[in-house]
Amino acid sequence: MTNASEGRERKTYGKPAAKRGGKSFDTRDKYERGSLKYGRRPSSGNERDEDKARSFVQKRRLNKIDKDVHKDTIRLNKYIANSGICSRREADELITQGLVEVNGKVVTEMGYQVQKSDKVIFDGQNITPEKPVYVLLNKPKGYISTTKDDKARKTVMDLVANASPYRVFPVGRLDRSTTGVILLTNDGHMTKKLTHPSFDAKKIYHVTLDKKLSGEDMKLIAEGIRLDEGVAVVDQISYIEGKPKNEIGIEIHIGWNRVIRRIFQRLGYEVEALDRVMFAGLTKKNIKRGHWRILSELEVNNLKML
């Protein structure tokens, strides 16, 4: 959750005044400490070394993607694997079974090289050789979560312009005034999975209200506030330990438009600041506001197992 200074000791949620789901919030150790606008904490030599190591890993991942983009030809098994269907070893099996066509002809030759312009068909579907890329952005205020805007407003695409040689798309949306975690990817299957209502992606927000939230209203929110779409189910809600009672931690899984703001507005509160600190297990830890990073292989595997 966002603190007034990154140099302060990390805090935890206090005991929830009301909750759903039978457990309180985890400690904030999992989550990023918030905006740097109040100043940076003094960095030690170890922290600088860690920053360099993270930077090196990011460059290596991007270089690997870039090399694939500029190759004239690519092995058929890698082409299939890059499309996100399966691993290279599994792709070899599909090829030997005669399940893959290149330019209208079945190919069973191991090590067969295809060009990017070739038409590759698997299971009756045309596939592309783009390697899936997953970019995690710590969105600042003032950017909209669309690929383009007719009013020429700033979008999250401006912030991740150099993140990938492939075109990526935001998974879900954060409104212009909301900050925090947002995922961008070219993996259509993953996007569909994470945004589908049945998936119930968990999201945690740090909410700052225009006045203190009463215990009675917190209980009403925990029980469910009726909105136009139905009852807005809140998984957990609590005050934040050591903070004024206008700062609230809230966990939800529903993805209705501006649902957090509308929940509080229904009870006569205005949301002055809204920061998403977690989405589908991903946090903004070690990502400065307005910056991004490529997900690690472990993080991608964790998303696929959700």
Image (cartoon, rainbow, N blue to C red):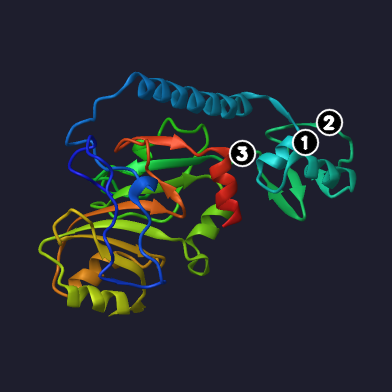
Percent x, y for residue 198? Answer: 52, 69
Q: Mark 1 or mark 2: which comes first in sequence?
A: 1
Seen in the image, is 140 located left or right of residue 115?
Answer: left
**Type of the residue with mark 3:** Glu
Whether residues under marks 1 and 2 lie with C-beta atoms below 8 angstroms apart, the answer is: yes
Residue 229 in sight from this viewpoint: no
Which residue is more in the foreground, 216 or 181? Answer: 216
- Report which residue position mark 2 lands on: 111
Which residue is drawn at the image coordinates 59% and 54% (left, top)?
189
Percent x, y for residue 51? Answer: 40, 25
Q: Mark 1 or mark 3: which comes first in sequence?
A: 1
Spatial separation of the CA atoms under disc 1 and disc 2: 7 Å
Percent x, y for residue 193? Answer: 55, 59
Which residue is more in the foreground, 287 or 40? Answer: 40
- Report which residue position mark 1 lands on: 76
Above or below 193: residue 57: above
The disc at residue 130 is 3
Q: Quadrant of residue 162?
A: top left
Assess disc 2: are there few (<14), some (14-19) or many (≥20) residues with their C-alpha within 10 Å of its C-alpha.
few
Say which element carries label 1. helix
Say which element carries label 3. loop
Which residue is drawn at the image coordinates 56% and 26% (left, top)?
66
